Amino acid sequence: MFYKYCYEKYGGIYETNNLLRCIVLCRAEYLEDFLSKSTHGMRSANYKGLKELGIEGKGITYNNNFKSWTFNRHFFNQAILSPKFTNEVIDWTNELFNELEGYWDKLFSREEIIKEKKNKLDFFIWFNHYKNDMIIKLLTGERTYSMANYFNTLSDEKSGHQSERVEDSEKLFQAIRKFHTGYLFFSVTTPFIRRYVPYYKNIANDILQNIGFTNQKLDEIIKRRRQQIEDTPLDKPLPHDMLTSMIIKNTFRDGNYIETGEANRSMTDSEIR
């Protein structure tokens, strides 16, 4: 009823301002250009929490700065649409699934386990860990061991991976997961509550400390990959993960490199992170 009333009074386009400022479009032709591929999609509201989290004007999903969003989306599209990246996805999908099947064989295929029904296969949890390992590998080119860590919690026989690397992987996954819940927390609480109400202040401080840890780990991965690229001879191929593609884009290691100034500069570590 409210929107119908506004439509009858104000026409096909009008603005409301309750908790958030909203512009309401009531005609299909208004939406055609708005939903086109060249349009800047606002993924989140513009609020102070983004700055406190250190993600204001960065990336794609939470970025409300049109110039920065366009620049970042160009790099993202170039990396993810590469045929070599697609081949990498296929190869690692198969390799990680073979590893997953190996864990299942050890946990669920033995005769004594089947008879006693010791273990139950939880597809959701397993594929969540599979997804974690897959995403990090394709994004950074580095192996993580979320599946191995979960296997270690279920079996007396441990995975063949180094325990330190398995534990570091789990810490990174937990930190990334907490970052996303932290984003929701910062989006629904006001700066006053986060800073001065003790219970919420403790939660906010924990989230900010977690973001510091996450950024530190990601910076280490980026710097390590930059060094690996520098140490790789020019006649040797580089990996085809997204991180490598973003680092070398618009540099002399890029096969399509053309030096044209600021418009085609390379990305900084902060922008990649």
Image: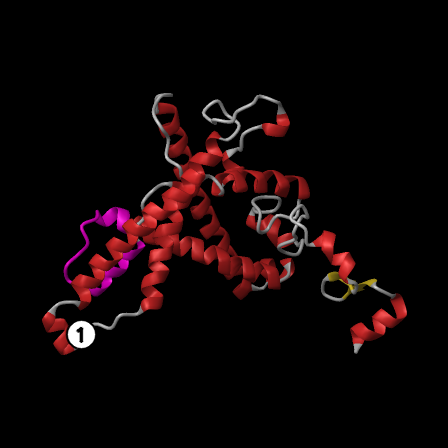
Q: Residue at x 33, y 57 (%)?
A: 130
**Where does the magenta region start and end?**
146-167
SS state under label 1: loop
Q: Quadrant of the N terminus?
A: bottom right
Q: Pointer 1: residues within 10 angstroms few (<14), some, or many (20+)? A: few
Q: Residue at x 66, y 54 (%)?
A: 47
Q: Position of residue 132 (x, y in %)?
A: 37, 54
Position of residue 84 relative to residue 255, above or below, is below
Position of residue 155 relative to residue 99, above or below, is below
Q: Judge whether residue 149 is colored magenta.
A: yes
Say which of 6 and 55 sits in front: 6
Quadrant in the picture for residue 69? top right
Q: Judge whether residue 127 is colored magenta.
A: no
Camera sees residue 12? yes
Say which of 185 and 202 sits in front: 185
Type of amino acid at the residue the image marks with label 1: Lys
